[in-house]
Amino acid sequence: MAMRKGLSPVTLTALAGGIAFLYIPLFLLVIYSFNDSRLVTVWGGWSTRWYQALPQNQALMDAAWVSLKVAAVAATLATILGTLAALALVRAGTFRGRTLFAGLVYAPLVMPEVITGLALLLLFVAIDFDRGFWTVALAHVTFTMCFVAVIVQSRLLTFDHSLEEAALDLGATPLRAFFSVTLPVIFPAVAAGWLLAFTLSLDDLVIANFTAGPGNTTLPMRIYSQVRLGVTPEVNAISTVFIVVITAVVLAASLAMKWQQGKAEGR
Amino acid sequence: MASAPLKPQKPQSVRRKFAPWTDPVAQPLISFRNVVKRYGGVVAIDGVSLDIYEREFFALLGPSGCGKTTLMRMLAGFEEASEGKIMLAKNDLSGVPPYRRPVNMMFQSYALFPHMTVSDNIAFGLKQEGMPKAEITARVEEMLKLVNLRGLEKRKPHQLSGGQRQRVALARSLAKRPKVLLLDEPMAALDKKLREQTQFELMDLQQRIGTTFIIVTHDQEEAMTVADRIAVMDHGKLVQVATPAEIYEQPNSRYVAEFVGDVNIIEAEVTRAASGDIALKSDVLDAELRLAQRADVKAGDRVAVALRPEKIRIGKEPLSEVHANCAQGVVYDIAYLGDLSIYHVHLDNGFVLKAAKTNLSRQIEPPIDWDDRVNLSWTPDAGVLLKS
């Protein structure tokens, strides 16, 4: 009711202003990716030539592929570790050092990325771990798992513990009870955690800069280094492609979650 | 269960004779032996010893926090006893995890798995024990029939009414044919009409399948309706373990008398104690109190007498030739319940006695009204002497 009647001129202006603030830069980027001119700042008419040129830019394609691989691996590991951390925090009661553990899990949320990146770099150098795909992936696990832990923990707090007890009571071992009852019920939260970790990994520049080795340049790193040599319309094009991909993934995920939720509520 | 009336397979007389706890050679199915449960420094269960027999419908009754749920959860295996032993069919259950106990539980919240259909919920326990598929299908069908849920097997829990969910939970906990079924406040979420109906269905079901049922409840009417025996609990201790009639008519303490049903408690002093005839004097009653009871008391003992309201006769006519067990007062409150009315009578010294009267005629104007002067009387076997 309030939603339907509530769009007064003031709220409408505020809404429009907020959306403009958030999306005008992205909108400009998308428009300029269709610019026919070689100069980024000069409008030369509509064209898709930069999109056609993309597949020919091997360096950019390689970087995109590395980014996707890193994001998938990092998101998966982060989801497993983050879910386990959330379980420990919600289920294990008040074990010794719980407050410290919670603090340690959440610290990366507020830790400046430069420091995380530097610390990881020092570690990899100290243990003589050759920098490459796995160093970036592990670094991304480190800084994304806390996000997964937060999301899954909030879901577990409202999870009816008697569901798991019922499974145990009916003869399921604790492990089977987790996989056949707990995990399916909290799955939307776990999936949301995975998607968040995936997108965070995909757009990270700072930590990847510290931990990536030669030949494992991620897409944000590639774009950043190209921009230093001057913004090309090609960069706008690949950025637009990424915006579309990420929007599609997030949209699909939220639709899937809504569908599952709708099923659970009988709609 | 709702529509088709169940036919009890045994005549009623067999049920009345069922009393293995009075049989000295009967072996209990479940045996709590000096069980103590502590949470940190707090004692939740304080030295409970209790035997429960096969085919028994047993109720644990008490207010919230009395330990009844803890006792049940220890039997299910969710809590370990701090001291003492719990035996099931002569096996010590210590250290046996919940998933290896031949005991199933129906949860207060029902705890139905929201992502599974009714059939899958019922089949869950059977799948865990690796039962062949064909047998699972047959058993699920049998369970659906038992609780009258056929036609709903493909539904998810959220598509069912409260009563239907309750029956799915019951079917799921019975599917493995446990030796003991634990019911944790099974009817708390149902409305009054449905609850009463379900209580009778549960009794019939238990009669037919012969499984030992243990129900946890804070509702004394529910416990009295369904159970063969009731254990009244308070602060982690068993106060009285007896049949519903014994609990109601021969409470062993003020706590039990007051917890189960409505009661007048009259403090009194024993003046004469002969076997089967005890005379008492109370500060609140002018007349002498006489009890036809055998009790280990002597003159001068301070005791309490429990007197149920329905055992007090109330009327406006003067009493003839009664010297003991009577009182006079003024009606100052009437609770009209339809079937009976409860009168709160102010005695001349200010003490209040509650008396119940069955409404035998369809009179709208009450035969006894506010501010009427009434006479109360009762027989020597109406009251119970309580020492604690």
Image (cartoon, rainbow, N blue to C red):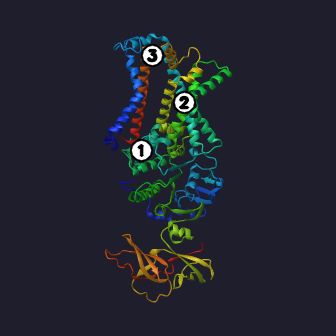
Res B157 label: 1
Q: Chain of mark 3?
A: A
* Of callouts 3 and 2, the N-terminal one: 2
Q: CA distance from mark 1 to mark 2?
A: 35 Å
Q: Chain of mark 2?
A: A
Q: Secondary structure at mark 3?
A: helix
Res A235 label: 3
Please tell me how crowded label 2 is: few (under 14), some (14-19), or many (20+) other residues with Cα within 10 Å. Answer: many
Out of B207 and A110, give the one closest to the viewer: A110
Please tell me how crowded label 1 is: few (under 14), some (14-19), or many (20+) other residues with Cα within 10 Å. Answer: many
Please tell me how crowded label 3 is: few (under 14), some (14-19), or many (20+) other residues with Cα within 10 Å. Answer: many
Report the mark closest to the observer, 3 or 1. Answer: 3
Q: CA distance from mark 3 to mark 1?
A: 52 Å
**Residue on which the image places disc 2:** A144
State the image coordinates of residue B294 (x, y, percent, origin top left).
Answer: 58, 78
Out of A46 and B282, give the one closest to the viewer: A46
Rendered residue at 57%/22% (across/down): A136
- Amino acid type shown at disc 2: Thr
Rendered residue at 47%/50% (across/down): B109
Residue A182 shows in the view: yes
State the image coordinates of residue A218 (x, y, percent, origin top left).
Answer: 52, 19
